Image: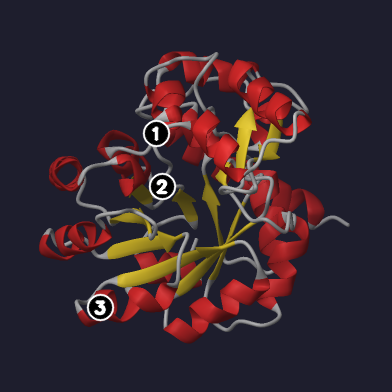
Amino acid sequence: MENRVTKLFKIAYPIVQGGMVWASGWRLASAVSNAGGLGLIGAGSMYPEVLREHIQKCKRVTDKPFGVNIPMLYPEIDKLMEIVVASGVKIVFTSAGNPKTWTAYLKENGLTVVHVVSSLKFALKAQDAGVDAIVAEGFEAGGHNGRDETTTLALIPMVKEKIDIPLIAAGGIATGNAMLAVMVLGADGVQVGSRFVATPEASSHDLFKQKVVQAGEGETQLTLKELAPVRLLKNKFYDAVQQAYDNGADKEQLKKLLGRARAKRGMFEGDMDEGELEIGQVSALIHDIKPAAKVVEDMMNEFKKAKNDVARF
């Protein structure tokens, strides 16, 4: 399959694995890249030297393209940028910040730059900043999210109408059927997060993976908008957040309740009660843990079948 996304990244299939904190290490990134997609190392949960190690390990086990996802709110972002350039990484996805800050630097060093947005407004700003592609992420997605709660179904055609560069859809995509749907709406490819959490290669704790597989409809919620909107699985910590809201908690009280390393405590260390468990709404459609390569294979088979099926109408 060849289109603007596969040409841009030099990959076989227009499937990008989300660079999720506490899930997207070198094992997952290399597995997805070896399967024909684009694997991403999630730098948001890594110290600079840890990122360097993951890049080196990824290079040892794949000769296929892979990238690094860097949240721009990261406190030592200058060190991360220096490492990706010095390590010969060719693709960087940026998020949670102004793309003008680093896009020129990265492109001057020969990197392909993609920026993640949750609205048309920021998609246009990213295009003006000179990025090579945009990920438009609907609020169904897990983890940190847009305040406007624009769904993927609405966001993709709105962005497609106004931009000229390749468009990657994210948020609520875990099947080939969903992949076809967003591509019909104008996307050139998809970014998949939650489905890749439930793989052996994801660095997340096994208890978290099991929790994702067990999740049903309505078991995630977007919350903590006053700090940074995040979609969480409901658990004891989530209940404490809701109780805080009921009691009229202000921003500082919410920040105190959240504390430090809450996401690591849940997703990486396996505290299913007090940890922050970031996952998308589509978790209700994830029923098993299977290898990342199988996820890619199944999505492409479903995509092709769905495309043939709708051709009859």
Q: Counting residues from the N terminus, which is met first, the one under dot 3 or under dot 2?
A: 2
Disc number placed over residue 23 in the picture, else none: 1
32 relative to 16, above or below: above
Q: Answer with the quarter of the image where residue 187 lies.
A: bottom right
Residue at horizontal 50%, vertical 77%? 126
Kind of residue sitting beneath label 3: Tyr
Q: Where in the figure is residue 134, as x and y percent of width and height?
A: 51, 69
What kind of element bears circle 2? loop
Q: Where in the figure is residue 158, as x and y percent of width and height?
A: 73, 73
Disc number placed over residue 15 in the picture, else none: none
Kind of residue sitting beneath label 1: Ala
Near mark 3 (Cα within 10 A), the count class, few <14, some 14-19 or many ≥20, is some
- Between 232 and 112, the one lying in front of the other is 232
Say if residue 11 shows up in the picture.
Answer: yes
Tell which residue pokes out farthest to the right in this image.
Answer: 313
Disc number placed over residue 105 in the picture, else none: 3
Q: How many marks?
A: 3
What kind of element bears circle 3? helix
Q: Give the CA distance from mark 3 to mark 2.
A: 21 Å
Horizontal placement of 15 versus 63: left or right?
A: right
> Which residue, given by chain and number where applicable, does mark 2 sit on?
19
Q: Counting residues from the N terminus, which is met first, the one under dot 3 or under dot 1?
A: 1
Kind of residue sitting beneath label 2: Gly
